[in-house]
Image: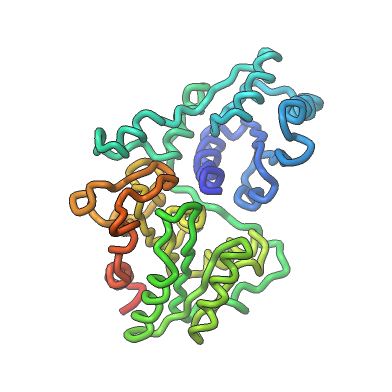
Amino acid sequence: MGDVVLTVPVIQNLLKKYPDTQITLLTNSFFHPFFDGIPNLTLYPVDLKGKHKGFLGLSKLVKELNHNQKFDVVIDLHSVIRTWVIGFLFKLRGIPIYRIDKGRADKKAFVQNKIRKALPHSTERYQTVFKKAGFDFTLEKSLIHPNNKIDFDVHEHINPKEINIGIAPFAAHQSKQWGMDKVSAFIEQINKKYKAMFYLFGGGKSEVDQLNTLAETYDNVTNLAGRFTLTQELHLIQNLSVLVAMDSGNMHIATLLGIPVISVWGGTHPDIGFSALYQPVENSIQISTDLLPCRPCSVFGTNECSLKEKPFACMRQIEPEMLIQRLFKLKIVQ
């Protein structure tokens, strides 16, 4: 989800520079709300678990695409086996293909402490592919604009007169999760000093169950996970005062909705190219690599922790007060 939503500012800036260009974007239909209101953009739903599954399914997809439309170029922003197959099938039709360089070698070197400079952001890597195809444009700040044509009053759920702190505590891997005990302690410490409302975000039954348990513990905590459509969630996030998130899709969504984001980093590192856009570097909360030389241990957080006596110390050593201090400096709480 994070990879998909980060294409939004790139596509918007390209179409701003080249308003006569027509783009057809292949992605899961669930992600379509990210692209609402973008002109000259056609969203084509890809069903990789159904009719577009496997080589025959991808062949069918390419035939569908070429049935009523002529394509001049194909841009591969994902560079995985599926998109290689799609590119190959388009190339057989004489259509040029441009593919992203994900910088896998540099990212691996960064994890191995052979590189310490910040690597290009994912949006810059997307931009580079388009430049290779002849589209030269700058990356200016650009946000998601959720569709307002919905029967939904966000203020029935989030009062704009309150301090509204969103928390998205989950990520794909354990090395990227702060832990529910830390989240609970964070809420408890804020409640001792400040008046605020908390809103929890997540997905999937296991996550929803854990968030429900946390919400039942505090009168000022509401679990929003599993209750709304993606478009509705975008409106809810847009009305937060701040979102506290892990290295996850929710982090990217919130920053592209224009709200402050405090991100928590453990086994991964923002300088590998996945940092929250438009946020000051101080908003990335992490333990210094000088204190924990094993950080980062993974590009995507998939590695097991090598610290057997203090597993996931990169996350466990991040204390709630570190985030609260950042909230204070951002004047979210006073």
Horizontal side of 227 relative to 248 (left or right) equals right
Question: Is 237 rendered above or below residue 4?
Answer: below
**Farthest residue, direction front:** 309
Q: Position of residue 178 (x, y in %)?
A: 39, 63
Work out whether 100 lies above or below 329: above
Q: Nearer the viewer, residue 61 or 112?
A: 112
In the rendered image, is residue 104 in sight?
A: yes
Image colouring: rainbow
- Left or right of 106 on screen, residue 24: right
Q: Quadrant of residue 334?
A: bottom left
Q: Residue at x 49, y 60 (%)?
A: 170
Residue at 40% x, 51% y: name it. Answer: 276
- Dividing the picture into quadrants, the one containing residue 325 is bottom left
Looking at the picture, how far across and down is residue 297, in whole percent? 34, 45
Q: Is residue 252 visible?
A: no
In the foreground, 241 or 4: 4
Tell me which residue sits at (48%, 84%) in the image.
218
Which residue is nearer to you in this view: 55 or 3? Answer: 55
Residue at image location 67% in from the left, 12% down from the top? 94
Q: Position of residue 2 (x, y in %)?
A: 51, 48
Q: Is residue 182 left or right of residue 75?
A: left
**Quick check: 184 left or right of 323?**
right
- Say which quarter of the image contains residue 241: bottom left
The number of numbered badges drawn on the structure is 0
Q: Position of residue 315 (x, y in %)?
A: 34, 60
